[in-house]
Amino acid sequence: MASSSDVDLAADRFDISGPAHMMAENGAGSSPMVIHWGKEEHRRCVAACLVKGVTVMVMDRSRRGRTDPLAPAWWESFGFRRLDVIKDDPDEIFGAIYEYKPRDGVPRHPLAPRYVVAFRGTIRTHLGDLRQDIRIINTTFRDSKRSEIARKAVDDLLDGCITVGNDDASASCIVWLAGHSLGASQALDVGRFMMSEKRLNLPTFLFNPPQVSLAPVINLLRPTEKAKKDLYTTIHCMKAVLGLPFYFHKKRMEKLFERLSPWEPELYVHEKDPICKGYIDYFEQRQQMAMMLSCRGMLLSLIGDEKETQHLLPSARLWKKSSMAGDVDGLQQQLCDLPRDVHRLKKLVGKAHSLEQWWKSDSELSLNCTQYKYRSA
């Protein structure tokens, strides 16, 4: 039986765990691969692998001297080079800036980025990451030092793009943002800031973005579809009624939504992932005026704290995955050996929240895509 360290090592090796369907097209070990930038599938796979590269970079540091660095293959295989890292102290790398260099003689595809800024997810042994997770829950994430550093890094990169002769519009097209889990919150914060404050619309790939909501708790109660619909209708009506005394807060949110509406981040979520399940319900159940306000946002407004609720997005493309090897719903219905089933449920939820699923082929994922656009009042 392989040890846990061997399993972790295999998961970090691009040749073993990378996008096999893209390798098959070009031959194992070919570098860089041929990327069809016009295909959403390839753009998604590249963005996910670049995010993985940041995590492996951090793990390489902990394995220093024991193995050769594994991280470079996650970006060099696609023709990228690491331009810089983003960190909030000397030892805490949480992001990276990659530059795409097409092979000699290959023209740059109009949908290809020039730079990708990628943010990794939580590493459970890193205390700094756990502190950021808590900030997401209590809606103070955008005020953190890490968010300030990330925004400045992307701002400086964009300033450089515009300085060398690009206009704002072209600079928007050549810089992508990507992140997984905690890193998705980071990319979301940067993208919102660039759109609302700089009018720069950056293509953004958010894998399993966290969204704190009651949806997972409601689903554990296993209500019927009619009961769920009635519950959400009641919540929406309450928000609409409660929104009446919050006139100025509502108007501020309307203006924010109008500024953000051209930005349509790509959200990749799994229906069985309780961490990002809230986004599915937010978009699928929302009624425009009611969902513009959140309970937390109204409460904070009442006490004079005008924080923006990060999960409230006016526009997005939601890519939803529902299938999984091993059915979570079936498991919940047949809990008989509690310790064993809890362990299995934890494992299945971990798979639903994993990054590696997002560099698989379309045929394996069977994604359902819905585009949501904001229509102003």
Image: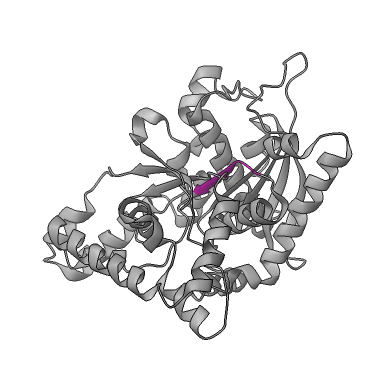
Front-most of residues 61 and 167? 167
- When the figure is inspected, residue 239 is found, relative to residue 178, above or below; the finding is below
Q: Residue 165 occupies which quadrant of the picture?
A: top right
Relative side of 200 to 287, left or right: right
User: Is 318 part of what is drawn in magenta?
Assistant: no
Q: Residue at x 60, y 59 (%)?
A: 189
Q: Position of residue 36 (x, y in %)?
A: 56, 21
Q: Residue 335 occupies which quadrant of the picture?
A: bottom left
Q: Position of residue 312 (x, y in %)?
A: 48, 60
Instruction: Specify whether residue 81 is in view.
Output: no
- Span shown in magenta: 201-206
- When the figure is inspected, residue 211 is found, relative to residue 104, above or below; the finding is below
Q: Position of residue 134 (x, y in %)?
A: 52, 75
Relative side of 52 to 284, left or right: right
Q: Position of residue 344 (x, y in %)?
A: 26, 59
Q: Residue at x 32, y 62 (%)?
A: 346
